[in-house]
Image: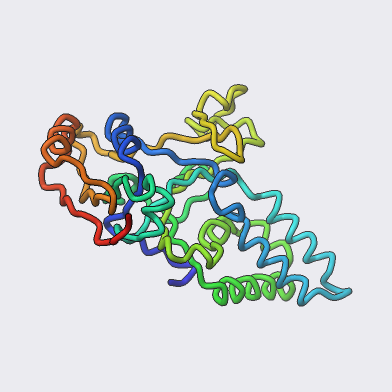
């Protein structure tokens, strides 16, 4: 993929425990956690570090202050990114082990357009602060992009970067070590440094904290998250593509079908078992 492109598949897959799956159907929503709580502690800052490294390579006495000003501009404009992670694939062993109760959970296939029809990478503004992001894990491409940006900054009007949205690069570039996850993500861009009301970006509020929910995560502490609707249609019917059972998940199919029927889930859901021979 190109970092400036955004190719989101029609069906995206979310790995989770059975308990989490039940909560998703019960609330018709899914958690989007702040980026600083992700398993990858470099999430949304990886490309910024690449940018710093490449800037130091080309730094000289003439451009040093310009590069510092530019990097500081990027840094102070890093927002809060509330991320819901999906994969392009529904049977990845590392995903089962890490995110689906060590293989005892499930992988739900959602239709991406039912979560959000905006396939553009989001930015912090009133019109498009929610959207989809396809992850790029190719470090050579990430470094090439950084060099192109830095070259443009040093050779053109320095004020140009003030109006450029670099959020797309921060969101799309990730440490290559996580390549196997094959991730696409749904992101809501907010900024807790302002008094902006998350429920209505054009207005301010003194009580931003009321718009978030909170959970405890070991080694991190309190984590703020947003609940994102997974069925943005007027109908109460809940349409999904599939449910894949983890390699250690042996669920009673009759009970599951009754459960899905309760929440008005479409009857043609594809039910499959993981092919991973993991125990």
Q: Residue at 57% x, 26% y: name it.
A: 209
**Vertical arrangement, residue 101 with respect to residue 91, above or below:** above
Residue closer to the observer: 94 or 228: 94
**How far from the left and from the top, in percent, is residue 26?**
28, 29
Q: Position of residue 98 (x, y in %)?
A: 43, 51
The answer to whether residue 117 is visible is no
The answer to whether 217 appears left or right of 21 in the picture is right
Location of residue 228 (image quadrant): top left
Query: Could you say where residue 244 lies in the image, as x and y percent from the top left?
Result: 24, 51
Residue 76 shown left or right of residue 243 in the figure: right
Q: Nearer the viewer, residue 252 or 27?
A: 252
Which coloring applies here? rainbow
Picture quarter with the C terminus: bottom left
User: What residue is rendered at 30% in x and 39% in y?
Assistant: 18
The quarter holding residue 166 reads bottom right
Q: Residue at the right extreme?
A: 61
In the image, residue 236 sits, relative to residue 101, either above or below, namely above
Horizontal arrangement in the rendering, residue 145 relative to residue 116 (left or right)? right
Q: Position of residue 151 (x, y in %)?
A: 69, 75
Which quadrant is the N terminus positioned in?
A: bottom left
Is residue 64 visible from the viewing direction of this image? yes
At horizontal 58% and vertical 32% (from top left) the residue drawn is: 222
Q: Residue at x 84, y 65 (%)?
A: 65
The residue nearer to you, when weighing 57 against 23, is 23
């Amino acid at each position: 993929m190109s970092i400036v492109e955004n190719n989101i598949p029609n069906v995206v897959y979310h790995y989770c425990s059975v308990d989490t799956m039940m909560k998703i159907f019960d609330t018709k929503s899914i958690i989007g956690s702040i980026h600083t709580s992700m398993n990858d502690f470099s999430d949304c800052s990886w490309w910024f570090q690449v940018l710093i490294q490449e800037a130091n390579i080309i730094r000289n006495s003439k451009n040093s202050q310009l590069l510092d000003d530019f990097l500081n501009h990027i840094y102070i404009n890093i927002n809060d990114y509330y991320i819901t992670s999906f994969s392009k694939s529904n049977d990845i062993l590392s995903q089962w082990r890490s995110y689906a109760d060590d293989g005892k959970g499930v992988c739900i296939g959602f239709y991406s357009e039912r979560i959000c029809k905006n396939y553009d990478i989001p930015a912090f503004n009133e019109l498009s602060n929610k959207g989809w992001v396809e992850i790029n894990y190719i470090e050579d491409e990430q470094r090439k992009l950084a060099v192109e940006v830095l070259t443009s900054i040093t050779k053109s009007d320095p004020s140009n970067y003030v109006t450029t949205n670099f959020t797309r690069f921060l969101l799309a570039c990730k440490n290559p070590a996580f390549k196997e996850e094959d991730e696409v993500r749904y992101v809501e861009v907010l900024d807790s440094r302002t008094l902006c009301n998350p429920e209505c970006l054009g207005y301010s509020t003194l009580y931003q904290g009321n718009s978030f929910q909170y959970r405890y995560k070991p080694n991190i502490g309190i984590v703020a998250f947003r609940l994102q609707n997974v069925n943005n249609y007027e109908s109460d019917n809940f349409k999904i593509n599939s449910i894949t059972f983890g390699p250690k998940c042996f669920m009673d199919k009759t009970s599951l079908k009754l459960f899905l029927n309760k929440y008005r889930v479409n009857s043609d859901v594809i039910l499959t078992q993981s092919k991973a021979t993991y125990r």
